[in-house]
Image (tube, helix red, strand yellow):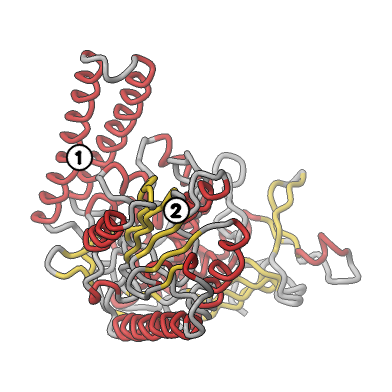
Amino acid sequence: MPSWNTAGYLRISREDGDRAESDSIVNQRKLLERYIGEHPELHLVSYYQDDGYTGTNFDRPAFRRMEADIAQGRIDCVLVKDLSRFGRDYIEMGRYLERVFPSQGVRFIAINDHVDSQQGRYDMLLPMKNLFNTQYARDISDKVRAAIRTKQQRGEFIGAFASYGYRKDPADHNHLVVDPAAAQVVQRIFDLFEQGHGKISIAKLLNAEGIPSPSEYKRILGERYHNGRRIDGTTYWTYATIHRILQNQMYAGRMAQGKSCRPTMHGKARQLAPSDWTVIPGTHEAIICQDQWERVQSLLRARARTPCFQSDPSPFAGFLRCGDCGRAMVKAKGSGGICYDCGSYKRYGSTACSRHSIPHAVLEQIVLDDLERVIGAVRDLPSLVEEAPVQSAPQAAVQGERERLEAGLERLYRMKKSAYEDLQDGLLDRGDFIRYKKDYERQERALTAQLEQLRRAGAPSPPRSPWAERLLRQGKLTHLDRATVAEVIRKILVFEDRHIEITYAFSNEQGLLDAESGRTV
């Protein structure tokens, strides 16, 4: 009797309803062991176990490993509990059972379906059984999708990992609560961007301070998080990370989900347009107030070039436009100092538009004077500008987060101690020990920096509107910076006839001024 080198293949899924079938890995293994015991011609080489993988495709690690062993001649028989354990895609299953395995001389046995390729041709009903298995998986997939859509429409969080700045509520994993330490970093990113810092500049600043990036922060605290967008080995802040945070509606208290869809059961996910996302407001505590969120989104849409505050102190980038052609004004340096010219004129010459030039000092003084005019017309200054409420993290939440970070430090200490003991016992060579030690020390520095951020969270945050604070204290504005311009001005138009039109963000007031005299016209 010939001997068959047998692979025992086991599979269970968390997605296609297998949990309701009493098909645990243990039960499958027992059945296969009993069958092998009753058939001495089967020589078990190894079990190949895919625990938690769907049967709707064959892209499974243990299955691919079994394929490689078959190609190398180590396996010539595949044993499974039933056809559904092998797979649920009837087209691919038919290809394996009717073409691939026969061409490789591989015997296939499905115990409960009474399939054994050595006993003769396949049962003519076998394709129908495969079809029913596929339909069952599709039905379960449709039900899961419907349940997920319902949860999304109710504003329940369904992700595996919360966005940076939040964590899952221990009492309800479909609800998010603020992570005070990370939330401080998010707030700081929005503040820095609004003050004129670019995304790369913000990333460099956080890296210099040793603040762990979102993916590294999750990993250090023991979460099994993997960022599919990240290049392997990247543990630092990047332009893309800052960009995604600034656009994430979660921070404004809105649950934004359903950003992609999978047209077929095992097809490639397709990204949806923002208008097709499921967005539910007021589902969790906001980290960023609505006014600041809208200001930052306006700045992002403006695509203003990031100013360098050492050589380019202009606060008007992104707000200053030609009143005739609508193109942004661009900075130019001349013998008389900094001025702004029409972008169309600078790029395409006088055939597109005229120069529309205005010196920076003149523009700044005009805006300050007109602001004083608008403010002077208001009898009750607090009614003009409402200060954003001072926010501070709840003390209990801060204390809980501090304990979580300190527990992370304690865990790293234990891991360092364990690595040293393994070195002493000869279980770890010195080179590996040094690499582990350096990694643990890097993580310790990152957690320590995060604790420092948390200490800042314990104190009240500064007011969201520093210009408003100066206005209410002094009764007038004495200078302009980018944060002030972003809060009080929507746009500034410079016309060919040397007139300037200013549209304010805090009222319907609109100033039309003469650039020569600075007087309203």
Q: On the picture, is 131 further left or further right than 167?
A: right
Residue at left offset 22%, top offset 13%: 424
User: In the displayed structure, would residue 174 be above or below residue 440?
Assistant: below
- Disc 2 from disc 1: Cα separation: 32 Å
Q: On the picture, is 186 further left or further right than 76?
A: left
The kind of residue tagged 1 is Gly
> Can you identify the residue that label 2 sits on?
61
Percent across and percent down for residue 130 are 46, 79
Percent across and percent down for residue 321 are 67, 69
Question: Is residue 117 something that shows in the picture?
Answer: yes
Question: In which image quadrant can residue 385 be found?
Answer: bottom left
How many residues crowd around disc 1 within 10 Å: few (fewer than 14), some, or many (20 or more)?
some
User: In the displayed structure, would residue 352 be above or below residue 182?
Assistant: below
Question: In which image quadrant can residue 31 be found?
Answer: bottom left
User: In the displayed structure, would residue 302 be above or below residue 430?
Assistant: below
The kind of residue tagged 2 is Pro
Residue 221's disc number: none
Mark 2: which secondary structure? Answer: helix
Q: Nearer the viewer, residue 72 or 193?
A: 72
> Can you identify the residue that label 1 sits on?
408
Counting residues from the N terminus, which is met first, the one under dot 2 or under dot 1? 2
Question: Is residue 480 something that shows in the picture?
Answer: no
Percent across and percent down for residue 28 are 27, 62
Of tags 2 and 1, the one toward the viewer is 2
Residue at left offset 51%, top offset 77%: 90
Residue at left offset 15%, top offset 39%: 406
Residue at left offset 57%, top offset 64%: 366
How many residues crowd around disc 2 within 10 Å: few (fewer than 14), some, or many (20 or more)?
some
Percent across and percent down for residue 271 are 54, 73
Q: Nearer the viewer, residue 347 or 233?
A: 233
